[in-house]
Image: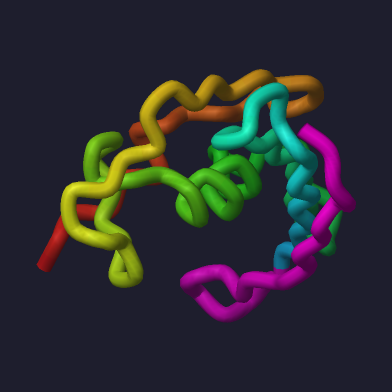
Amino acid sequence: SSGPESFIQGSRITGDGHYTDKFMLTLNPGDSDNSCQLVACSQSQVFSVLDYSTNYCNLRNLYCSEGDGCVNANAVENTDLAGYVEDYVDCKQNAKSKCIVSSR
């Protein structure tokens, strides 16, 4: 499949309101017509040795589904990203359990 890359840039203010994390997602065409590759990066804007998976969750929470145990206000009912694979290039802290937020 061919086509242009698409970029999404944004930022997230942490729950305590003290820090801002910036992120960028690049969507590339996948190997088949119904697939794509998501390349993403989230970075704290202050020096941070341990972020307790915050940057990973900043990104994962944008694509995880109810099938992953995620609560997503914009999710279409019974939708799941079947067959996705995460590949960590430079993400040492990637605990999925830290990303899950219980429904209220």
Based on the displayed image, in which of its 4 quarters is residue 72 positioned? bottom left
Range covered by the magenta-colored residues: 1-20
Left/right placement of residue 98 relative to residue 37 reads left
Is residue 17 magenta-colored? yes
Q: Position of residue 40 (x, y in %)?
A: 74, 44
Residue ranking furthest to the bottom: 17
Up/down of 54 relative to 95, above or below: below
Is residue 18 magenta-colored? yes
Of residues 78 and 62, the one drawn nearer to the viewer in this rendering: 78
* Residue at 81 percent of width and 58 percent of height: 6
Left/right placement of residue 72 relative to residue 30 reads left
Give the image's coloring scheme. rainbow
* Residue at 56 percent of width and 69 percent of height: 14
Where's the N terminus, which quadrant?
Answer: top right
Residue ranking furthest to the left: 104
Left/right placement of residue 31 relative to residue 45 reads left
Up/down of 85 relative to 63, above or below: above
Where's the C terminus, which quadrant?
Answer: bottom left
* Residue at 54 percent of width and 21 percent of height: 85
Based on the displayed image, in which of its 4 quarters is residue 90 positioned? top right
Of residues 55 and 36, the one drawn nearer to the viewer in this rendering: 36
Based on the displayed image, in which of its 4 quarters is residue 75 positioned? bottom left
Q: How many marks?
A: 0
Of residues 27 and 60, the one drawn nearer to the viewer in this rendering: 27
Q: Position of residue 7 (x, y in %)?
A: 82, 60
Up/down of 62 relative to 89, above or below: below
* Residue at 64 percent of width and 76 percent of height: 18
Q: Position of residue 88 (x, y in %)?
A: 69, 21
